[in-house]
Image (tube, grey):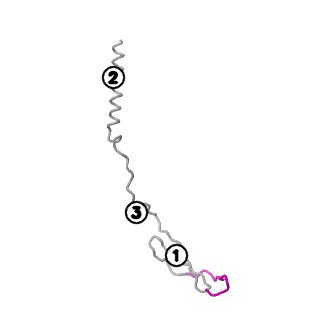
Amino acid sequence: MKHKRVTRKLAAIAGALCLSLVILASPIASTPVQAAPPQDDAAMPLSDYIEWRFKIEGHSLYRRLFNYSTAEWIGEWEYVMEIKLKGGGNH
């Protein structure tokens, strides 16, 4: 009986050692983790970045859409409203 217990303990220890060696020697455990190399255009927006641009001619305010993603104007200048400039002078 005592011989069987010793044999079972030795078998359990041998199995645990083999399992430990398999885990330590596996390619997953030994492969170093590396970050992806940085890229200049890592963040690509899904849509274009478009905003209004404004200009003043005389006492009139105009607006036009500008696509910052492609650096292109969209449409034509459109009149918004008359404005009163501070200082009373012509700018």
Label number found at residue 88: none
Residue at mark 3 to residue at mark 2: CA–CA distance:
56 Å
Question: Mark 3 against mark 2, which lies toward the viewer?
Answer: 3
Q: Which comes sooner in the sequence, label 3 or label 2? A: 2
Residue at mark 2 to residue at mark 1: CA–CA distance:
77 Å
Q: Which residue sits at x=53%, y=72%?
A: 51
Residue 32: image x %, image y %?
A: 36, 45
> Which amino acid is tagged 1?
Leu
Which quadrant would the N terminus be assigned to in this image?
top left
Q: Specify start and end residues of the magenta stretch as a single range.
A: 78-91
Looking at the picture, does residue 21 appear above or below residue 83? Answer: above
Q: Which residue is mark 3?
A: 40
> Which amino acid is tagged 3?
Asp
Q: Are marks 2 and 1 in contact (CB under 8 Å)?
A: no
The residue nearer to you, when weighing 77 against 39, is 39
Looking at the picture, does residue 34 appear above or below residue 71? Answer: above
In the rendered structure, the answer to whether residue 33 lies left or right of residue 91 reads left
Secondary structure, magenta segment, majority class: loop
**What secondary structure is found at the residue carrying circle 1?**
strand
Q: Which residue sits at x=44%, y=63%?
A: 44
Mark 2 nearby-residue class (10 Å; few <14, some 14–19, many ≥20): few
Residue 76: image x %, image y %?
A: 51, 81
Q: Which residue is mark 2?
A: 11
Q: Which residue is mark 1?
A: 65
Is 85 contained in the magenta span?
yes
> Which amino acid is tagged 2?
Ala
